[in-house]
Structure formats: C-alpha cells, structure tokens
Image: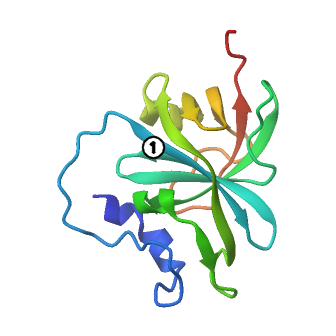
Amino acid sequence: MAASKLETYQKKRDFSRTREPSGAAKKRARRKVKRLSYVVQEHHARRLHYDFRLELDGVLLSWAVPKGPSLEPGVKRLAVQTEDHPLEYGSFEGEIPKGEYGGGTVKIWDKGVWAPLGDAHDGLERGRLTFVVYGEKLRGGFHLVRSASTGKTSRRKAPANWLLIKSHDRQ
C-alpha cells in the first residue's frame, strides 16, 4: 500500500546516483504503530530550507519550510507540501549529488514522535491538522493550515501551500 504512495518520490530520483532510501517494497513484519515518527531535516539545496516530515500510513508526509519551524507561538511559516517520502528517509543524512533532484546536503535538525489531536486524515482533508510533537528541539502543539488560495490538492496535482504555526501551549 505505501509503495504506491511513493511513486512521485521514486520517479524524481536516480537511485544509482543517490544514497537516498528508495522505499522499494520490502517484506516487512506488520508493525503496530503506537508512536508516529517526526523529523525535521535541514536541507542545503539550491536554497536552505527545512523538510518537516510526519509519519502517517507507512510514509512520511512532507513539507518544505523555507525559514524552518518557529519556536515562537503564533508565528506563521510557509510550508510547501512535497511528495511523500519512505519511512527510512527519517534517518537519512548525507549528500545528494549535484544535478539530482534536491541536490545538496541533508542533516537531521530535530527528531522525535508526534500525535495528532483528533483524526489526522480528517484534518488533512479539511486543511487543518492539529498535533503535538515531542522532539529534541521542538515540543508542544502545532497546526498545519492549508492556504485558502491553493484549495484542496491531491497528491498528483501541484503542491499545496500550508502554514506551519506553533500553538500557545499551557505553561
């Protein structure tokens, strides 16, 4: 099931040239997911940005955040939805060769687990996902809110612009 979700990811890469995980179908024991992984990767490509990734349904949902996530409540950061990535990408660090899609250096900036507040699938469909992250740098509530100007998008259409917003957490 997850392999078809990775079709766009796989078409953009030449795995004979890059060490990025391919997400190729492997026979895996079905795991009961109690904790969903979360990772932010600092990506020095054409321009520095941060890749914000949330595990859901066997893949990492992904957004490129040009200025990186804010630690300050209420600050809105542009988050451009990108293709789903394989779960193995959550531990990827290294160099993507120049000339390849996303060429540049990738390193893990933060990692941990996340929990949706409410139904994650419904939140994504409605364009407002509310969740909590338990990372090494980021902790607490966040919202991903789809921009009204981009409307709903399927995974096959142009990427949607979202806003990543840190919640006001209770002290």
Judge left or right: residue 60 versus residue 104. Answer: left
Residue occupying the point 72% across, 32% down: 165
User: Which residue is most to the top?
Assistant: 171
Which residue shows up at 47% across the image and 29% down it? 115
Q: Residue at x 76, y 48 (%)?
A: 68
133 and 12: which one is in front? 133
Question: What residue lies at 65% left-to-right and 44% top-to-bottom?
Answer: 151
Q: Which residue is mark 1?
A: 37
Residue 94, percent from left and from top: 60, 72
Compared with 62, 22 (above or below) is: below
For disc 1, the neighbor class at 10 Å (few under 14, some 14 to 19, many from 20) is many
Q: Position of residue 72 (x, y in %)?
A: 80, 28
Q: Position of residue 139 (x, y in %)?
A: 63, 29
| Residue 59 horizontal side relative to residue 31, left or right | right
Front in this rendered view, residue 51 or 121: 51
Quadrant of residue 76 in the image? top right
Q: Position of residue 38 (x, y in %)?
A: 51, 44
Residue 125 visible in the snapshot: no
* Label 1 residue SS: strand
Position of 71 with respect to 88 (left or right) is right
